[in-house]
Image: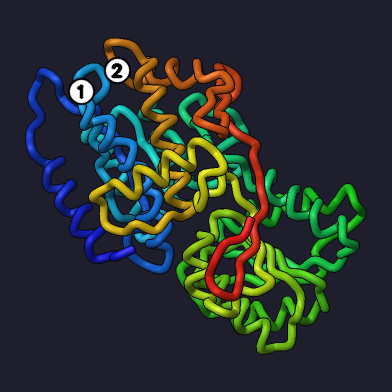
Amino acid sequence: MNRRHVLCHLAALSGAASLPALADGAPILLGQSAPFSGPASELGLAFRQGAMLVFDQVNARGGIGGRKIELRSMDDGYEPERCAANTRSLIGAGVTALFGYVGTPTSLAALPLFTAAKVPFVAPYTGAEALRTPFNRYVFNVRASYFDEAAEIVKQITAVGIKRVAVFYQDDSYGQSGLQGVQAALKPLGLAPVSLGTVERNSTDVAAAVKSVVAGSPECVIQISAYKSCAAFIRAARLAGFGGNFYNLSFVGTQALADELGSAAKGVIVSQVMPFPFSTRTPVAGEYLDRLKASHLPGKDPSYSGMEGYVAARTMVEGLRRAGNTIHAESLVAGLESLHDFDLGGFFVNFSAQRHNGSKFVDMTILTEDGRVRH
């Protein structure tokens, strides 16, 4: 993806968003805070690109009830304080909903703000348990949780006899959420992590973490961080003599991790919460690939992050369509809650008035030495 072109595209959209809207047929304003700069930027850029494939097509066909969808995106650099400031600005601008926030610490910074304002928070790019429990009427999770992913990873590694598991995690709410998921999955088996290592958010200083993890003589390492720090850890751990496999949660950014590692990607496994985006094996993936190829958006490479943005936007559009003639926060909540086993094309979203966690789908992929993702 050409980051400069994407950022120029964002700037143009931001400028357009500042123009006064007509009273009749005013756009449906959605707000997004995500990293479009910094070490996690590829996640935000790819997610937004996938979402815009949907919103642009809907707008080209006349929008929702004659109203076009406007996604106002703001850069938070994957920093909670910036995200909170962005969220206040977006709520103040009168957004119908917040959409596609990227990251656990940033989403949690927004949580008290959108809850107090009673603004729906739809399809955050995070599996954090804190956005699922306790139930929040305004949070709609499209993806499976980190607990779901950790359970699948532990199931796979213990099925082949691995018992010595180490965890490398980001030292914030994201890393803690993933660590808790791993611990919860290991506990019924009478197991616990043999060693732990941490890294600061937006940092690649992993020397201490490698030393701590390797000291436990693990057979595999589960990683709960973003792609740059995970790639740095993998390289350093290999140099330190670790020969086992690395398992990553989906938030790592699969293609970004593969690109960072190059030939060092061998033995790296990533859990996934979205359909495989590199072939037409599911109808929704076929749609995503077709629209990506035909789009005028910068960057044509498919990715899991782009696929998630696409699925999230499809879900949002259907919720808006079901919100009725007068679209506002409460009618959108009702519209989303009516999505019972809604089939997007091989990927199902299941909401109700009591359940806002739309999916428990988890799949596993492996990275290859030539930078590809194998199902």
Marks 1,2: beta carbons within 8 A: yes
Q: Residue at x 17, y 54 (%)?
A: 11
Judged from this view, the residue extending furthest toward the top is 325
Q: Nearer the viewer, mark 1 or mark 2?
A: 1
Nearer to the camera, 162 or 121: 162
Nearer to the camera, 314 or 199: 314
Across and down, in percent, residue 276 comes to: 56, 48
Picture layout, residue 215 above or below residue 61? below
Across and down, in percent, residue 136 comes to: 53, 28
Local crowd at mark 2 within 10 Å, few (<14), some, or many (≥20)?
some
Q: Residue at x 44, y 37 (%)?
A: 312
Across and down, in percent, residue 137 comes to: 50, 24
Using the rendered view, name the quadrant where residue 194 is placed.
bottom right
Q: Name the residue type under label 2.
A: Ile
Picture layout, residue 327 above or below residue 276? above
Picture layout, residue 232 above or below residue 33? below
Q: CA distance from mark 1 to mark 2?
A: 10 Å
From the viewer's perspective, is 58 left or right of 179?
left
Per the image, the residue denoted by label 1 is 67
**Can the viewer see residue 217?**
yes
Per the rendering, the mark at residue 327 is 2
Q: Name the residue type under label 1.
A: Arg
